[in-house]
Amino acid sequence: MARILGIETSCDETAAAVVVDGRHIEANVIASQDDVHRKTGGVVPETASRLHLRHLVPVLERALDTAGRDWSEIDAVAVTHGPGLAGSLLVGLNTAKAVSYARGLPLVGINHLEGHVYANWLDQDGARPEATISGADGPEPSLPLVALIVSGGHTDLVSMEAHGAYRRLGRTLDDAAGEAFDKVARMLGLGYPGGPAVQEAAAGGNPKRYALPRAWLKGSWDFSFSGLKTAVLRTVRDAGDGLVVPDLAAAFQDAIVDVLATKTIAAAREHGAQAIALAGGVAANVPLRARIAALSPVPVLIPPIRLCTDNAAMIAAAGYFRWAAGERSGLELDVFPSLPIA
Ligand code: KG4
Ligand code: ZN
């Protein structure tokens, strides 16, 4: 049995968690900066790192407190060291190093994207919620699996062959899926963060009123969303006062979900995947979850929505599997803002 403390500060959530054996959450504390970044319509890196500095120690203390544990019961510290904003990553990494040094605890550096995938190993209230959504029957995700990692900064289609072993099949050539949601939300005058706002607006919309393009990039597993984004902008300009926001939101969401779901399922078939895992903030999107679950030939693992967006439990889960494999990071571990998953 191993109890891992996870620390995550790669973007705009200050988070700490205590997780046992990579699966059982004892505490998962998140201080969100959404309210601050909403005022600027996006994350200002300097503001984000200042807020991490202010919040991380109280968040850490709260995590231990909630778990009812003290430092002597922690076996290792797992921390995100990339990808992400350099200044934000530094706050988490330096704090993790200080704790590791002061308490004599092993340090394990984690790739944020790998963390998102490991949200699928976490259980919630002793049950695996995705088992009921998707028909997954085992207690654990089966490998190899194909993971679609879709967040504000990333869109990666990855084959996970074993714990810690990834092959990147494709990625976005321009905007990340979440970034496209955020930018379109701004064009449509919807809220921040954009994904949930677009999803909500689209719920009452007719996706057929506006025709939007889909970039299939046939023959590759890559994605491109900038053409779609430009088409939305052109539609907004052309429609003027006659714009029906819910219909355009629905058409946009439909286009993005269509491409993500179709390519993910095709990749799973071609690579003999035993499962599809969704990961990252955009995996919170309900139509995306529903489309993939409906079309997939294999079980679909979908973390509960609160574990799709940035949190430290997923970092602790990934950290457990690396720790169990004997991996340790030295105090020379550095931040790596553009760290790829493979
Ligand atoms: O993984 P995450 O919390 O942070 C990053 O590592 O980027 O992802 C945040 C992204 C944002 O772009 C947000 O708009 C998007 O996830 N998002 C959604 C939904 N909820 C969050 N996108 C579409 N539909 C949602 N329901
Ligand atoms: Zn993330």
Image (cartoon, grey):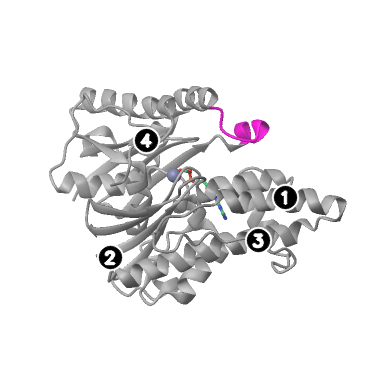
Give the residue number, with chain letter if any, for mark 3.
212
Residue at 43% from the left image edge and 28% from the top image edge: 88
- In reply to whether residue 43 is colored magenta, the answer given is yes
Q: Which badge, 3 or 4, is on the more N-terminal residue?
A: 3
Quote the CA–CA distance across marks 3 and 4: 31 Å
Question: In this rendering, which labeled residue sits more in front, label 3 or label 4?
Answer: 3
Identify which residue, 233 or 49, lies in the foreground. 233
The residue segment tinted magenta is 35-44
Give the residue number, with chain letter if any, for mark 1.
234
Give the residue number, with chain letter if any, for mark 4.
338
Q: Dot 4: what SS? A: loop
Say what amino acid the circle numbered 1 marks: Arg
Say what amino acid the circle numbered 4 marks: Ser
Q: Which badge, 3 or 2, is on the more N-terminal residue?
A: 2
Which quadrant of the figure has residue 117?
A: bottom left
Q: Which badge, 1 or 3, is on the more N-terminal residue?
A: 3
Q: Are marks 4 and 2 in contact (CB under 8 Å)?
A: no
Give the residue number, with chain letter if any, for mark 2.
140
- In reply to whether residue 237 is colored magenta, the answer given is no
Residue at 27% from the left image edge and 52% from the top image edge: 22
Identify which residue, 273 or 117, lies in the foreground. 273
How busy is the neighbourhood of tag 2: few (under 14 within 10 Å), some, or many (20 plus)?
Answer: some
